[in-house]
Amino acid sequence: MSSSWTFKQNKVFEDALAKYDKDTPDRWQNVARAVGDGKSVEDVMKHFAKLQNDVEEPALKEMVRYYRELENRAGGGSSSNNAKGGSSRGGSSEQPRPWYLKTQ
């Protein structure tokens, strides 16, 4: 099993992923064969999982940051009862809850 990937191997890997989509029978065998250089099916599957994580993790962090910013703009900061699930009804000192936090 080979763990380091060259620029050329990455490029061939990306091209193979485009050629052999998720519905292709024996996708990972085809990708490993295309990459060559001793890369196994396990190697290409692990590489794909790592790349997926590298893409998804920053996107998730950005989504959390975005929703926190929306919440703060709407007055539902983290110290607010509303952000912790408090009622939006009641005294006038309570801040309105953002639409995505309102219960139905």
Image (cartoon, rainbow, N blue to C red):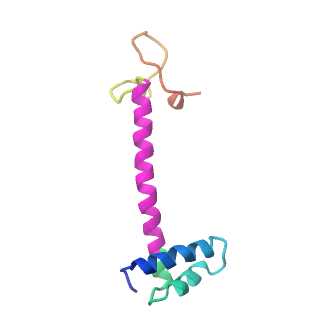
Residue drawn at point x = 55 percent, y = 81 percent? 31
Quarter the C terminus occupies = top right
In the current view of this chain or complex, which residue is farthest to the bottom?
A: 38
Q: Position of residue 65 (x, y in %)?
A: 39, 41
**Quadrant containing the N terminus in the rendered view:** bottom left
Q: Nearer the viewer, residue 87 or 35?
A: 35
Q: Which residues, given as a range, are shown in magenta?
A: 46-74
Percent of width and height locating residue 58 = 40, 53
- Left or right: where 30 falls relative to 88: right
Residue drawn where x is 53% and y is 32% of the image: 100
Which residue lies at the image location 44% right of the left edge and 66% below the top edge? Answer: 51
The spot of residue 74 in percent (x, y) is: 44, 24
Q: Is residue 3 left or right of residue 18?
A: left
Q: Position of residue 61 (x, y in %)?
A: 40, 48
Q: Please check the rendered image and state whether residue 69 is part of the magenta-colored stretch, yes or no.
A: yes
Number of numbered discs visible in the structure rendering = 0
Taking 53 as reference, is 24 above or below it? below
Q: Magenta region, mostly helix, strand or loop?
A: helix
* In magenta segment, residue 78: no
Viewer-side residue, 62 vs 87: 62
Q: Nearer the viewer, residue 19 or 81?
A: 19
Give the quadrant of residue 69. top left
Q: Residue at x 44, y 50 (%)?
A: 60
Above or below for 58 versus 34 = above
Q: Residue furthest top?
A: 92
13 relative to 59, above or below? below
